[in-house]
Amino acid sequence: MSYSYRSSRVSTAPRRQSRGGSRPNRSSAQGRGRKGDYIDPSRFIKVATATQTEQYVAQHSFADFNLSPILKANLAAKGYTTPSPIQDQAIPAALEGRDVIGIASTGTGKTAAFALPLLNQLASEPNSRALIIAPTRELAQQIEVECRTLGRGTGLTGALLIGGSSMGIQLRDLRGNPRIVIGTPGRIKDHLLRGTLKLDRFNIAVLDEVDRMLDMGFVNDVTTILKATNSVRQSFFFSATMDAKVRILIDTFTNDPFTVSLKASSASESVHQNIVAYNTKTDKLDKLHNLLIQGNVTKAIIFDETQRDVERLHKELELRGFSTDSMHGGKTQGQRQRALAKFKQNEINVLVATDVAARGIDVTDISHVVNFSVPKTYDDYIHRIGRAGRAGKIGHALTFVQQ
């Protein structure tokens, strides 16, 4: 990285089993292992409404914050002048050293809300170290990119610890005593068990998308990781929702936190939702084909249940002439990155995926979300359809339901 933040290069080679033994892939196991809730199909039908949102008036500009000149210069270079609501409210408290809880939807600027105070402290206090935990590889990489951009010129070093990337490079980066470690719970815990990562000197901890992390079954890993960090610690917890599991974790690992709670915009407000009724497998494929050739389908993400289902559907759509790729936990990180890059750059306009792609993917121009398989839970449904209807646009979500 240009500001000396070294990241692990992505390997396209098959993953080797770590010394700690094999780890189940939670993203793919999630589809098979969890029992689904019954969801009344009527909940998949809703007309998008154009809602007028109250204009937020920021109380600060980025220039007002007590940030280092380097960080302010980097913000100016990105054209950032006015903070988003969560940045405006969270950054002052974070700069005072308080624990921060942020309840806000994806796309509200959460990353900068914790990255700027974190980078500022690391740049001014040489003994400080920060750990950032994200539920998916893709989100961890996006956080890394944002930290790299905002922290350019600070001289901070770091390591990215995610599955599907070179363990050798991760070990090299960890030997360099990184000031920032960003990763997913499984891989961070792997390094803890190996003894290649010691967290007792890490006095800043960030958990992003806490609710998703706990939904994916990472509660024990996250608890183990946080217990290994310094007991005198500034903590940041960001989540779209606040249920009992999230509340217990926050209460355990925060001290008198400052809470920012923004009204979460419901996915239903900006997404037309409907069902597609089908009888047989052939009928289902034909109806999907007819849907995808409609003129208003400019970019679609199709969710299916398992890795095998995704690959089978991807190949079938390729045979039918669609420009498509697939994305799931069974692919190497390099393959997933390339598929996502092609989707973002419009080299393909159909991405078939498991729920591993339901969060942590920042693509603003998805016109359609297609649930080729019914989601396990209604929360999963909301996460899926939230990929459409972004950046002020109206999106479409279609769920296939057998008659």
Image (cartoon, rainbow, N blue to C red):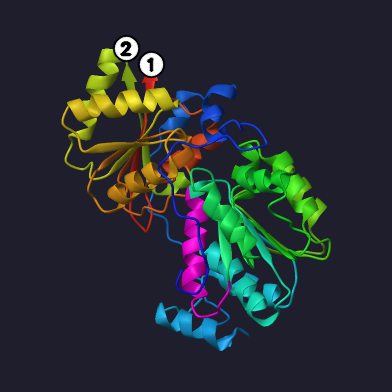
Disc assigned to residue 55: none
User: Which badge, 1 or 2, comes first in the chain's sequence?
Assistant: 2
| Residue at 37% over, 42% down | 335
Image-based side of 76 in relation to 346, left or right: right
Report which residue position mark 2 lands on: 279
| Residue stretch in magenta | 138-156
Report which residue position mark 1 lands on: 402
In this view, the residue in front, 346 or 38, is 346
In this view, the residue in front, 219 or 177, is 177
Label 1 close to label 2 by CB (< 8 Å): yes
Amino acid on which disc 1 is placed:
Gln
Magenta residues: mostly which secondary structure? helix
Near mark 2 (Cα within 10 A), the count class, few <14, some 14-19 or many ≥20, is few
In this view, the residue in front, 199 or 301, is 199
155 within the magenta span: yes
Q: Which SS class for mark 2?
A: loop
Locate residue 39, reporting x and y percent.
Answer: 52, 25
Q: CA distance from mark 1 to mark 2?
A: 6 Å
Amino acid on which disc 2 is placed:
Asn
